[in-house]
Amino acid sequence: MTATTPIQFGIFTVGDVTPDPTTGRTPTEHERIKAMLTIARKAEEVGLDVFATGEHHNPPFVPSSPTTMLGYLAARTERLILSTSTTLITTNDPVKIAEDFAMLQHIADGRVDLMMGRGNTGPVYPWFGQDIRQGIPLAIENYALLRRLWTEDVVDWQGRFRTPLQGFTSTPRPLDGLPPFVWHGSIRSPEIAEQAAYYGDGFFANNIFWPKDHFKRLINLYRDRFEHYGHGTREQALVGLGGQVFMRKNSQDAVNEFRPYFDNAPVYGHGPSLEEFTEQTPLTVGSPQEVIDKTLTFRESFGDYQRQLFLMDHAGLPLKTVLEQLDMLGEEVVPVLRKEMAAGRPAGTADAPTHAARLAARDAGQDRAATQSEEAAV
Amino acid sequence: MTTNTQAQAARLAVVSAGLSEPSSTRLLADRLAGATRSALAEQGVEAEVTTVELRDVATEIAHNFTTGFPGGALRGVIESVTGADGLIAVTPVFSASYSGLFKSFFDVLDNDALTGKPVLLGATGGTPRHSLVLEHAMRPLFAYLRTVTVPTAVYAATDDWAASDDGLTPSLPGRIARAGGELAALVAPRTGAAARQPQAAEEEVVPFEQQLAALRVEE
């Protein structure tokens, strides 16, 4: 089982099939999927804590079926937490999410959490029978149902977006009766920060493509509202952040090697220069020390946080290069970040959520409640 | 850009999409700002004018389309425009409409960022034959943005800069003065009011219970 740590480090993948701009070669879907599996196993090998896969339903992306992929990885890894970035709470049936991820919890012995997101590909909504203008209401209603399916054995349900349920039991029940931990991912919606705060869930600000001021406001809102709803102090709120790096021993080598991938990347290619983008967003292209320095600024902007995921494998980077990047991340960057972030961490800051830690906390709470009711009875 | 904030000064933002230096578009923009300032002064309201040349942020505007966020100086420019008490927007006529740069700037604003804002429109061109661009292109754009656009929009053709008042139609200075007066009349009462709120300093949010209640979701 994964030990309790102040902060978890990991990688998240979009699962894009993109031509390598330096060779013009496009991997097949099969090659890309196998590469993702290799990358995930490498993440565990180099000592990272989390692997998260995106969910997409249109080319050039391959990961349409996250729990299939994560189920395989559950069998091939020992410690790695298997997660998503994101699971589409708007267009997936919440009943299927409840079933799939409870099943995965059992298979992976609890090494599972997930990140809810709405998805930003317009046509996915109508393809799955939904209306994009209802994005926020769908996220709210579907998640409310998902929680009930995980926490109540028998559910009667009627909502606006889904066929009613009468006497429905979602199987299997969550491992140890404890649903997977949930992060809510958002890049711009305060409603989602509010939702995460209301439930005392985690809030993941996928800050990799935007300047930090925007995310400061969202994370501050989430922390304030987490406290408002009585889940703990602002510092006990559970925050995750994204990052994006490309490293070589010598900074200029990293810049030269990564530039063609940057310039042609589907997300930001043909826009601002690499230099402008690294100045304005969390992207770091340089030496491992530069990555450490930049990542350590995140806590100054957003407060101490619980999960740091890096995007390492997009824009057509070859598998071999990605694996080299993961070696550097695991050997040279993350050990330093763990040490630095643990050292300056204020007392009372929440640890990163794991199944074992949450289970212990719940049982301690139940014991306390039981003791109190016994005392009340006497 | 001006940053001092006098207690009761009206904040005017002037957006000029002129490209040459000097440009007649900027000239018209300055004249419109001057007329508005004079009309405000007559009502005892001081004006603080921030003028933006879109040419200076043209690259950042293009990047905003590819990255989704305003980089560099563009962010400050957007804040000065969305936070102003009144806006003067002037474009050269290109291919029978506002310039692409002018449109692109308004495309990267949030679509409700200018709702309710008093706006004065101006355009420049080589001949008077494009003057209706104000009515068939610019007014619909600002209607979509839900601004409060003043009745007089000012078009300046090259010849206008040398035309004298012939007693039949108002000369360019006369049109500028009328337009400035109209904008001042809308801006003066707003000064120091709603626009004084800091721009996006904090996120606002509907409490979650209300969102659940709106869906009648049972917990």
Image (cartoon, rainbow, N blue to C red):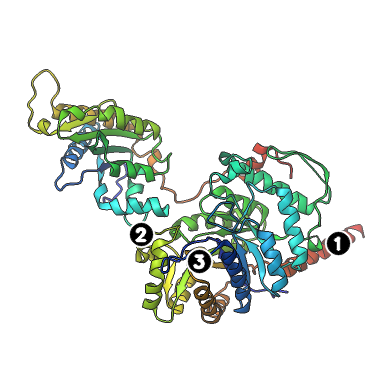
Which one is closest to the eye, mark 1 or mark 3?
3
Q: Quadrant of residue A173?
A: bottom right
- The residue that label 2 is drawn on is A272
Q: Quadrant of residue A133?
A: top right
Callout 2: chain: A
Which one is closest to the eye, mark 3 or mark 2?
2
Q: Amino acid at mark 1?
A: Ala
Callout 1: chain: A
First-in-chain label (3 vs 2): 3
Determine the residue positioned at 73% across, 69% down.
A357
First-in-chain label (1 vs 3): 3
Structural crowding at the residue carrying mark 2, measured as other residues with C-alpha within 10 Å and reported as few (<14), some (14–19) or many (≥20): many
Callout 3: chain: A
- The residue that label 3 is drawn on is A243
| Residue B75 place in picture, x, y as percent | 36, 52
Task: Identify the image quadrant of the C terminus of chain B.
Answer: top right
Determine the residue positioned at 59% across, 67% down.
A36
Tell me the CA gap for discs 3 and 2.
18 Å
Q: Are discs 1 and 3 located on one and the same chain? A: yes
- The residue that label 1 is drawn on is A370
